Image: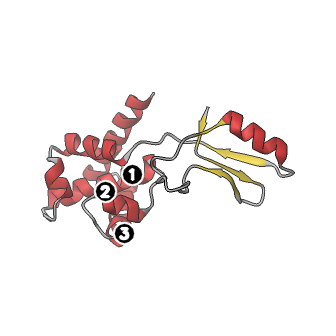
Amino acid sequence: MELDRVTNEKGSAVLDRTQSMGGVSSLDAPPVYFSDVLIVASQSSFNVTVEHRQVFPIARIIRFVCDEFQVSQIDLLSNRRDRDLARARQAGYWLCRKFTLASYPQIGRMFGGRDHTTVMYGHKLVGRHVSRRTDFGVRVLALLAKINGRTQ
């Protein structure tokens, strides 16, 4: 079983795939397996909590977004600010936070070198659209369901 993070009862990371390891970026870090958890747990006097979620590379999410919003990857990563492109990017930010362990700055770099505050704003905006079930929010949820369907 592949895991993302293992913490002790104090919340300290015991094994953490989200942190960089020896010059390897967190997106390329090797997975943590359940057998590793058993070894750590047996050597620890703390209770161990395991967190697990499906993780995708950001580049794969970008491809899903381009397909759904019918935009090219070049346009999506460009400096153009058309409403359709901005919405597609924002959907991508939101999906990246759902399906990756990437930080806002990491997502911004993958989306054409955008500032982390731009990613934060877009993520928050899409969250509002999703919770209010606007047309855009429903479209993003449909893309979420599509991605989930391909992972199982």
CA gap, disc 1 and disc 3 = 13 Å
Mark 1 and mark 3 lie on one chain; the one further toward the N terminus is 1
Q: Residue at x 27, y 65 (%)?
A: 113
Residue 103 lies in quadrant? bottom left
CA gap, disc 3 and disc 2 = 11 Å
Classify mark 2: helix, strand or loop.
helix
Residue 91 in view, yes or no: yes
Mark 2 and mark 1 lie on one chain; the one further toward the N terminus is 1
Amino acid type shown at disc 2? Met
| Image vertical order of residue 146 relative to residue 69, above or below | above
Q: Nearer the viewer, mark 3 or mark 2?
A: 2
Label disc, if present, on residue 110 of the rendered structure = 2
Residue 37: percent from left, percent from top: 72, 40
| Image vertical order of residue 96 relative to residue 55, above or below | below
Amino acid type shown at disc 1? Cys
Residue 81 lies in quadrant? bottom left
Relative side of 8 to 86, left or right: right
Q: Are marks 3 and 2 in contact (CB under 8 Å)?
A: no
Q: Residue at x 83, y 52 (%)?
A: 46
Classify 10 Å Cα crowding around label 1: few (below 14), some (14-19), many (20 and above). many
Classify mark 1: helix, strand or loop.
helix
CA gap, disc 2 and disc 1 = 10 Å
Residue 152: percent from left, percent from top: 45, 27
Label disc, if present, on residue 16 of the rendered structure = none
Q: Nearer the viewer, residue 116 or 17?
A: 17
Q: Residue furthest right?
A: 45
Q: Nearer the viewer, mark 2 or mark 1?
A: 2
Label disc, if present, on residue 96 of the rendered structure = 1
Residue occupied by mark 3: 116
Classify 10 Å Cα crowding around label 2: few (below 14), some (14-19), many (20 and above). some
Q: Nearer the viewer, residue 60 or 99?
A: 60
